[in-house]
């Protein structure tokens, strides 16, 4: 598709769509709990639809009337073997979290996905789940999809130190731990998003979190709940950056999720001197309104325990850094290489094709700021990565002339109404 420039600036108020991580988990907890779960403001992006379809194929009744989603929970014991292999689409979260649930179910299930997902490593969940007693086979020593999981009714608790900072691996182990005998101990490498731990408590489960150490007793039964999904800060990130870099912009983003394990981007914007205010902070719903406007920015360093708190925002943060004064350094972010694409290489290539000065490194990027972006000579390809597509669409706002985006449909993964919202704010 052809992307358009914007010379007037972006203005207006927007409620960003529901959080993808919380939406997946609401379906999963709803399914493994007893009784009804009602979910408001769920994200109806393709990744979440993959999770919904998978549980429906395992016998869970899930209804969507357009206002709310109702999950008729069956408990772990009520989940049935699917009649066919389960299609995980593009979604790492669906695959890895579901694997933790399947680890304790006494039947075999095969999971497959699209080209991008089929390249991503699943050994990171296979290793702990095998230690607990599940049988898992996949392609190559990285256990890539298609992957077959044969669960066990006799899962054993483990003590496990996560070798990577990953909420998906942590969550897979927690879902298996709920079905195991004994208390499972998980120690995180860095603190990652806490949605699984929080929703487990909401659904009446037991978990102890102290710093990076998590204890989960086995043999738990959960009860259905009402869940209201806050807006996704990872989707809001595109509008935050757009307002900061497109002259004459001011945006008000309502109901943005501000769980402290997700707000790294807000800290980066503050460190860069961006003009941004939080209001209507709701400590219970963990959401806020964020007002952001165009202004001057300076480079910064992004590394260490900040990385997991903004991992999905790094593509658009790289774009932000191209418009700041001075250098921005991103380190400790090697995980970017195993997302929907190698996001270090693909971000650097896409933005450099527009005149940015980004040097990719082994675990991040060095970005020289203050570059004027221009139309690339060739089309930019998302390579099936939604975040590359949206980052490119925001970059296009700064460019005179046309930008052709190939495989733009990837954006459906996490933000189906992205271009509608862009249109609304562009006026
Ligand atoms: O648990 C989750 O919902 C997610 C965890 C992160 O992945 P990793 O756990 O692989 O870092 C993130 O990149 C992904 O978009 C969603
Ligand atoms: C990495 C992402 O998602 P997933 O791992 O679920 O495919 C993402 O949304 O940027």
Image (cartoon, rainbow, N blue to C red):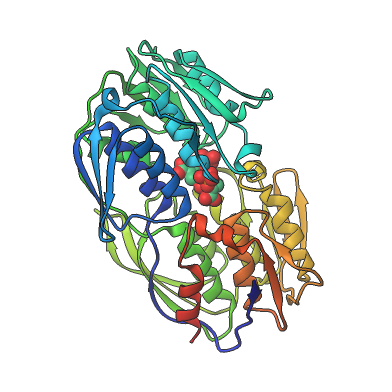
Check the image and report above or below for 4 versus 36.
Answer: below
Q: Position of residue 264 (x, y in %)?
A: 49, 54
Q: Nearer the viewer, residue 391 or 275?
A: 391
Determine the residue located farthest toward the bottom in the rendered image. Answer: 8
Residue 163 in view here: no
Check the image and report above or below for 309 versus 61.
Answer: below
Q: Position of residue 246 (x, y in %)?
A: 58, 80
Q: Total number of numbered labels?
A: 0
Q: Is residue 259 left or right of residue 321?
A: left
Q: Position of residue 35 (x, y in %)?
A: 17, 36
- State the residue at coordinates (27%, 18%): 219
Q: Nearer the viewer, residue 221 or 304?
A: 221
Check the image and report above or below for 28 versus 245.
Answer: above
Determine the residue located farthest toward the front in the rendered image. Answer: 83
Q: Nearer the viewer, residue 132 or 74?
A: 74
- State the residue at coordinates (63%, 80%): 4
Q: Is residue 389 left or right of residue 282?
A: right
- State the residue at coordinates (43%, 25%): 186
> Which quarter shows the N terminus?
bottom right
Residue 184 in view here: yes
Q: Position of residue 144 (x, y in %)?
A: 62, 30
Q: Is residue 178 left or right of residue 149?
A: left
- State the residue at coordinates (64%, 67%): 392
Check the image and report above or below for 8 versus 98.
Answer: below
């Amino acid at each position: 598709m052809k992307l358009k420039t914007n010379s007037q600036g972006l203005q207006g108020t927007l409620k960003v769509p529901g959080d993808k991580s919380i939406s997946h988990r609401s379906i999963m907890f709803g399914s493994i709990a007893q009784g009804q779960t009602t979910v408001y403001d769920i994200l109806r992006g393709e990744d979440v639809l993959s999770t919904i379809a998978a549980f429906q194929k395992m016998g869970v009744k899930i209804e969507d009337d357009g206002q709310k989603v109702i999950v008729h929970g069956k408990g772990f014991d009520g989940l049935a073997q699917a009649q066919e292999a389960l299609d995980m689409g593009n979604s790492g979260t669906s695959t890895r979290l579901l694997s933790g649930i399947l680890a304790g179910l006494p039947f075999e299930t095969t999971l497959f996905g699209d080209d991008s997902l089929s390249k991503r490593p699943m050994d990171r969940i296979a290793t702990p789940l095998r230690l607990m007693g599940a049988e898992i086979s996949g392609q190559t020593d990285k256990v890539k999809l298609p992957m077959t999981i044969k669960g066990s009714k006799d899962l054993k608790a483990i003590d496990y130190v996560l070798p990577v900072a990953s909420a998906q691996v942590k969550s897979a182990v927690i879902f298996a731990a709920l079905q195991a005998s004994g208390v499972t101990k998980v120690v995180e490498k860095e603190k990652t998003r806490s949605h699984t731990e929080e929703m487990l408590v909401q659904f009446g489960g037991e978990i102890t979190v102290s710093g990076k150490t998590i204890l989960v007793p086995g043999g738990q039964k959960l009860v259905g709940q009402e869940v209201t999904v806050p807006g996704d800060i990872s989707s809001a990130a595109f509008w935050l950056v757009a307002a900061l870099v497109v002259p004459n912009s001011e945006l008000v983003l309502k109901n943005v999720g501000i769980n402290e394990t997700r707000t790294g981007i807000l800290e980066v914007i503050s460190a860069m001197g961006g003009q941004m205010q939080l209001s209507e902070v709701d400590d219970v719903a963990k959401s806020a309104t964020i007002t952001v406007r165009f202004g001057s920015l300076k480079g910064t360093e992004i590394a260490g325990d900040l990385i997991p708190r903004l991992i999905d925002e790094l593509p658009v943060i790289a774009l932000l850094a191209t418009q700041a004064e001075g250098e921005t350094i991103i380190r400790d972010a090697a995980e970017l290489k195993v997302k929907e694409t190698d996001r270090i290489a693909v971000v650097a290539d896409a933005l450099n094709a527009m005149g940015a000065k980004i040097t990719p490194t082994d675990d991040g990027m060095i970005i020289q700021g203050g570059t004027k972006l221009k139309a690339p000579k060739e089309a930019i390809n998302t390579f099936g990565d939604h975040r590359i597509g949206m980052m490119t669409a925001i970059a296009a706002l700064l460019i005179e002339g046309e930008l052709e985006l190939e495989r733009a449909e990837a954006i459906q993964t996490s933000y189906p109404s992205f271009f509608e919202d862009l249109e609304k704010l562009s006026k």
